[in-house]
Image: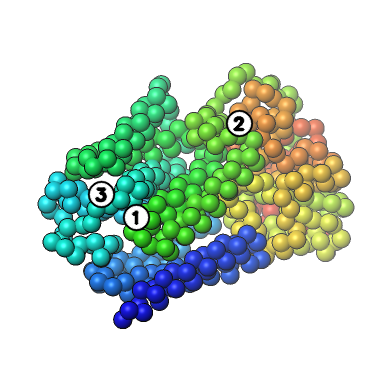
Amino acid sequence: MSWLPTLIKACYFLAALLFILGLKRMSSPRTARGGIVWAGYGMLLAVLATLFLPDMHNRGLIVAAVLVGVSAAWWSGKRVAMTAMPQMVALYNGMGGGAAAAIGAVELIGYARGLGLLQAVPDTSPLRPEAWAVNGLPPALSPTELALGVLGALIGAVSFSGSLVAFAKLQGWMDKRFVFPGQRTVNLLLLAAAVVAGVLLATSHASPALIAAFFALALAFGLMMTLPIGGADMPVVISLYNAFTGLAVSFEGFVLGNEAMIIAGMVVGAAGTLLTQLMAKAMNRSIGNVLFGSFGAAGGEAQAIEGAQKPIDASDAAVMMAYAERVVIVPGYGLAVAQAQHKVWEFAQLLIKRGVKVKFAIHPVAGRMPGHMNVLLAEAGVPYDLIADMDDINPEFPATDVALVIGANDVVNPLAKTDPASPIYGMPILDVSAAKHVIVIKRGRGTGFAGIENALFYADNTRMLYGEGQAAVGELVASLKDIDA
């Protein structure tokens, strides 16, 4: 079947096309679901084509592993709550990085065997079936292949362990930040040691002990790099590790000569890199500052916040918004925790029926992952044309009668503009304080996820509606219905 390799490459090309078109459709909420489906068909096609590679071994094991993975993903995807979606994304991303690192490990072990340094490796490989034809020995990797294999293994291992730490932080299994004196020095030493080990591996010194040390160092660096990063930086970190995973997959695809892996990895790596840069820009911070800074830690003596938080009950808040001309609703992670998106949309619909102009304002890093708030609102059925990004909505706040903040904290904190000592100073925020009136729904008087006090809550034009998000919005809905009765 001389035509089979050509057919497989054609399938890879079609799969790559589906990946790219799917990603393009994911750029809009209106077409994102279809984009995911297209990319999924592309992945299915690539997997099926790979199974038909000439002399492919262990097909049964591969199919069994695919079935186990698909079943686990289907089960967990159906059960996971929207509030837990960020940690699921971190976990799945880590699995991708771990898979790339595992491919690198197989290639390096095979390379060590070819050098006569390791004899206990099977004579067949499901990854490079053409590689073991003569005397059970793998072919010599070119210097470029070897270098990219080592680099992909390093990046994949860092993404794997770092993503697992991000998952643990978001899941609440680990403290938000873990720091100790000299931590940056330790991290740099770990990275330097991993790079040195990688260089040795790439220069024909692939002993089993060195391979083990290389992966141990890479995994330790990913772990130690993520431990000190605060929870408020998790959206950027998740996006960065997503880019790492894509790059690792692309590098390992080059080593395997698999076009589908190369293109898919490049697409994921490029998209993740661009998203990371956009999110870092939205926080007015460099990626280096996210990874090695101390967001959420004291940056000096902060400005004293004057005044007191002024409570309001739901009935008064409902009356204020019922007779307003313009209302802007600002959702945050507290809305996700309370699963209040459906109640919020019900309340917004009641306002719209009264002739109130309602919009939803989204900060680029609101929630715990990119697009988290958009997904929540879309799930509730909020029309896309009512959802505005920060740059579009900020000029409208001075003409807004009431801004309703639900569970958001740092992204509406005026100290980002007024207090140079604040850890979030310089971060672009939603200019909620410029509205004529502000109502904040909050569970208590504590600080937000980054542990920073919010001056907005003490402003003269702000009133606090204390309570769990869904219950508080339910009271607003009931009060508004009473007005209309």
Q: Earlier in the sequence, mark 1 or mark 2?
A: 1
Name the residue tied to disc 1.
255
Query: How was the colour assigned to the protein in this rendering?
Result: rainbow
Where is 132 relative to 431, above or below? below
Q: Amino acid at mark 1?
A: Val
Q: Real-space Cα distance between discs 1 and 2?
A: 47 Å
Name the residue tied to disc 3.
108
Name the residue tied to disc 2.
452
Q: Mark 2 Cα within 10 Å, few/some/many (few <14, many 20+)?
A: many
Q: Real-space Cα distance between discs 3 and 2?
A: 47 Å
Q: Mark 3 Cα within 10 Å, few/some/many (few <14, many 20+)?
A: many
Q: Earlier in the sequence, mark 3 or mark 1?
A: 3
Residue 392 % position (x, y): 77, 49
In the picture, measured across the screen, residue 400 lies left or right of residue 299, that is right
Where is 107 relative to 431, above or below? below
Q: Earlier in the sequence, mark 3 or mark 2?
A: 3
Q: Residue at left 49%, top 31%? A: 292
User: Which quarter shows the C terminus?
Assistant: bottom right
Q: Residue at left 78%, top 62%? A: 350
Where is 17 relative to 192, above or below? below
Q: Real-space Cα distance between discs 3 and 1?
A: 11 Å
Helix, strand or loop for disc 2: loop
Residue 455 % position (x, y): 70, 31
Q: Residue at left 52%, top 69%? A: 18
Helix, strand or loop for disc 3: helix
Residue 288 % position (x, y): 52, 33
Direction top: furthest residue? 301
